[in-house]
Amino acid sequence: MKKAIDILAEFLRGVGQAQYFLAATLAATPRALAKPHLIAQQIYSVGVLSMVITVISGMFIGMVLGLQGYRTLVGFGAEESLGVFVALVVVRELGPVVTALLFAGRAGSALTAEIGLMRATDQLSAMEMMAVDPMQRVVAPRFFAGFVAMPLLAAIFCVMAIGIAGGYAIGVELLGVDAGSYWSQIRAQVEMDDIWNGVVKSLVFGAVVSWIAVFQGYHAAPNSEGVSRATRNTVVMSSLAILALDFVLTAFMFKID
Amino acid sequence: MAPTSTDNALVRVRGLHFGFGRRVIFDGMDLDLRRGQVTALMGPSGTGKTTLLRLIGGQYRPHRGSIAFDGQDVHRLSRAKLLELRKRMGIMFQNGALLTDLSVYENVAFPLREHTRLPESMIRDLVLLKLDAVGLRGARHLFPDQLSGGMARRVAMARAVALDPALVMYDEPLTGLDPISMGVAMRLIRTLNDALGLTSIIVSHDVPETLSISDYAYIVSNGKVVAAGTPEQVKSSGSEWAQQFLKGQPDGPVRFHYDNSDYGADLMRKALA
Ligand SMILES: Nc1ncnc2c1ncn2[C@@H]1O[C@H](COP(=O)(O)OP(=O)(O)O)[C@@H](O)[C@H]1O
Ligand SMILES: [Mg+2]
């Protein structure tokens, strides 16, 4: 019992610390934005890290959706709705969620390891002693870059998945879906609201993953074991946070509709 | 920058008390770094030498006592004033602590870019000047992971003096260097100090090398200064502790063994168990 209370107290302290850290990061962001080249560099490196894996995953998810969707819909004689089915599933759910999971595993873990190593090798201390604020120079640009890059990656994922699903169903398998109806159904039935839902989710997931990643890196114990633990924490905590938040956001969005 | 105080000590530490949790690191420590001099601070690993440098830089706050830099109490300054003060201190960390995503050139340029609005041509002149002083002008395109330990520290030295600070702090500048690099590094510290009119502190446990270029030396143990003076005075110090440290003897007031229970008794206990 006492142990459980200790663990809970430890967890709550961590949450408090993380909130304080987020506030400090946001406070440092305006000054970090004054050096746009640092942000651009981070968006580039975060984007490049995650781009290939996002594109490939989008393709495979697209192929699976094309196949599964067609097999299910053809039973109801509704195979011309394949486009809407794929587009809604991808834009509202799979795009943001799968991209965020990949982003956490690829870019989030790399961010944590990078900042943790900077801590372990005294680079952050050295900056402080050179009167340079590491929050402003290191943390804020990376946080902001993650926040911006996630929706872009999710958009790439969505385009890949929807395009490939269509291409697969129409062309490769010759399942008999008509190309015209695939695209016109998407245009007719997918509304701006659906796209907004996806964008909001991507922004939230991007912010949360980046927050967890920079926090874990900054507070990693300054040795190799500490960095590896922090990296693992980033992946596990981000993944759970993404899935839990996805449920909360989805429930909330259906209420508004 | 003209000194704001006419005191002959640039840094004055008085009655310093500090610790981590319950572990006491400094227990009433006094120390002066005189202007223009190279001061050595020696003591075994774990005595708090690095911690002292961080206290001087205002990264930690003393529990009691004071540290004054050029007449200003480091720990009573506002955050903005402290940052201003740090621009007048250069520090070379134990392993160099170079920024791994920047080249040698950009590492030395880093403080200049952050704190000055000099044109690129002048930054280039300054960086090459400092790199030339440490003999690494030719290595400016390399990245930190392409440098040997000795080279990385020399780059860190060039970075530490990039803003022409008043004080330079060297944390273990010799540890892990081969004898030639050691000699080079020591002479470099002396030359930089005299040529640029700096005040330097070297934290080290390499006794003869450090003493050979120092004007003044402190030996610390258990949070206090146990011997202080010119290198000659320190070498002939009456302190049992200082003698043990200087000569590297395992027996004396400082025990080599962590747990000082009797070895024979320990063996017996095992045999009986
Ligand atoms: N951030 C810290 N938290 C807790 N203990 C520390 C911390 N930094 C250093 N110590 C401890 O303080 C003592 C002095 O450390 P340090 O100043 O690095 O010694 P030195 O540089 O003389 O080898 C060591 O025992 C070390 O374990
Ligand atoms: Mg040390």
Image (cartoon, coloured by chain):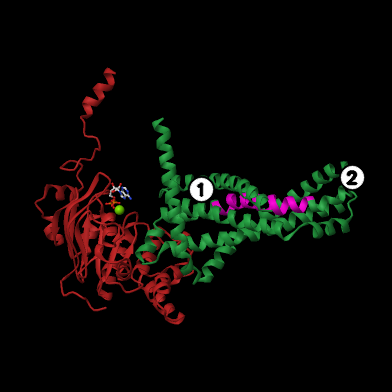
Distance from mark 1 CB to nearest ligand 1 atom below 8 Å:
no
Mark 2 crowdedness (10 Å alpha carbons): few <14, some 14-19, many ≥20: few
The question of residue B7 being in magenta is answered with no
Distance from mark 2 CB to nearest ligand 1 atom below 8 Å:
no
Name the residue rendered at 27%, 57% in the picture.
B61
Pointer 2 chain: A
Q: Amino acid at mark 1?
A: Thr
Magenta region: A85-108
Q: Are marks 2 and 1 on the same chain?
A: yes
Name the residue rendered at 37%, 61% in the picture.
A126
Tell me the element at label 1: helix
B179 horizontally vs A154: left or right: left
- Percent coordinates x, y for residue B178 in the rendering: 34, 56
Q: Amino acid at mark 2?
A: Gly
For the residues labelled 2 and 1, the Cα–Cα distance comes to 48 Å
Quick check: B52 above or below B2?
above
Sequence-wise first label, 2 or 1: 2
Q: Which chain is red?
A: B
Is A121 or B271 nearer to us in this picture?
A121
Q: Which mark is residue A231?
A: 1
Tell me the element at label 2: loop
> Which residue carries the number 2 mark?
A77
Colour of chain A in the image: green
Q: Quadrant of residue A244?
A: top right
